[in-house]
Amino acid sequence: MATVPRIIEEELRFKFYYGDTFCLAYNKGCTQYGDMYKSRPDFYPVYSPSGREVTATCAYRYNHHKSIFIGHADVNGINFFHDNNPTRSNLGDIVLEKCQTEIDENGMHVITHNGWITKAGVRLLDEERNFTIMLGENAHIIDLTSTLIASQTNLRFAQDNHAFIGVRVADTMDVEDGGTILNANGQRNEEQAMHQTADWTDYSGAVAGKTVGVTLMNHPSNPPSAFFTRNYGTFLTNFTLLEDYGLAQGERLTQRFRILIHEGCATEANIEDCYNQFVETPLRW
């Protein structure tokens, strides 16, 4: 009997199953203050096919690193990255406003619309964020498309380390505990991979006695994007890491990413084949 993918929608998250196995969740966010406060959507928990938890949320360093997440610390001066840290001024929230789900032969699809909204309630921009999840026995894939829309005003995404799509790996996977960062250029760890432009960057290490990893891939249609890599366990691909980026009112910026959650180290995961397949995948939305 074929293993059937399933989506279960709860009040504040979507849960994704491969048969009876819970594989990952997408948290919608909750901007109400209190125990469930979360200023932007994220993926958590995220499990490898063997059931290892490959990401961390509220990490011991920098608790704004929420597993797999999107944000930007300076959009027209508003910070959509650092959550509700009271020492940060001009904070904003990424609010999921609409969503729908579909399942077909190509995977499980979630179509969402987000508002990037200041704490004063001013809408700064809109985002169409859509993703497809394909679950497998040796690797899981998340294909994510983010379209930023300058719906209200001209936008300046300032040059900043703290943007755009990031991953915080499980603590035991980080380089400080024996893990490895490797990019498509063959560069390793923070010392070589930081600020480098690459088709993909992988972070692999041990969880519960087995090596697993997460690869973050840039589609070639994206703006030039460099990677921000840290040996303590975080990495991001960031179209404003090296320079700022502007959108005039009415313009849109679409970026495509593939996240590979795999067993084994980077050299065992067939990353290059997966990347080439991603490049050839037509844009769904």
Image (spheres, rainbow, N blue to C red):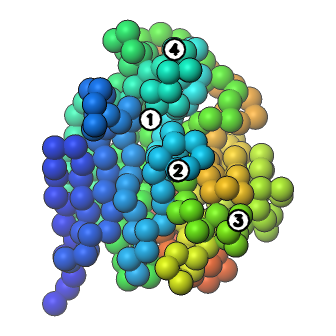
Instruction: Measure how far apart labels 3 and 2 are at the Cα level.
Output: 15 Å
Question: Looking at the picture, which amino acid does disc 2 mark?
Answer: Ala
Instruction: Measure how far apart labels 1 and 4 are at the Cα level.
Output: 23 Å
**Mark 1 lies on residue:** 147
Question: Looking at the picture, which amino acid does disc 1 mark?
Answer: Thr
**Mark 4 lies on residue:** 90
Q: Quadrant of residue 189?
A: bottom right
Q: Quadrant of residue 118?
A: top left
Q: Would you call the spot at circle 2 few (<14 residues within 10 Å), some (14-19), or many (20 or more)?
A: some
Q: Nearer the viewer, mark 4 or mark 2?
A: 2
Say if mark 2 contacts mark 1, CB within 8 Å.
Answer: no
Which label is found at residue 135? none
Which residue is drawn at the image coordinates 60% and 68% (left, top)? Answer: 173
**Mark 3 lies on residue:** 175
260 left or right, relative to 181: left
Mark with earlier residue (3, 4): 4
Q: Nearer the viewer, mark 3 or mark 2?
A: 2
Mark with earlier residue (1, 4): 4
Q: Nearer the viewer, mark 2 or mark 1?
A: 2
- Residue 79 at least partly seen: yes
Question: Looking at the picture, which amino acid does disc 3 mark?
Answer: Val
Which residue is drawn at the image coordinates 40% and 81% (left, top)? Answer: 50
Question: How far across and down, in percent of the image, does residue 282 sit?
Answer: 44, 56
Determine the secondary structure under disc 1: strand
Which label is found at residue 59? 2
- Residue 183 at least partly seen: no
Q: Nearer the viewer, mark 1 or mark 4?
A: 4
Q: Nearer the viewer, mark 3 or mark 1?
A: 3
Instruction: Measure how far apart labels 4 and 2 are at the Cα level.
Output: 23 Å
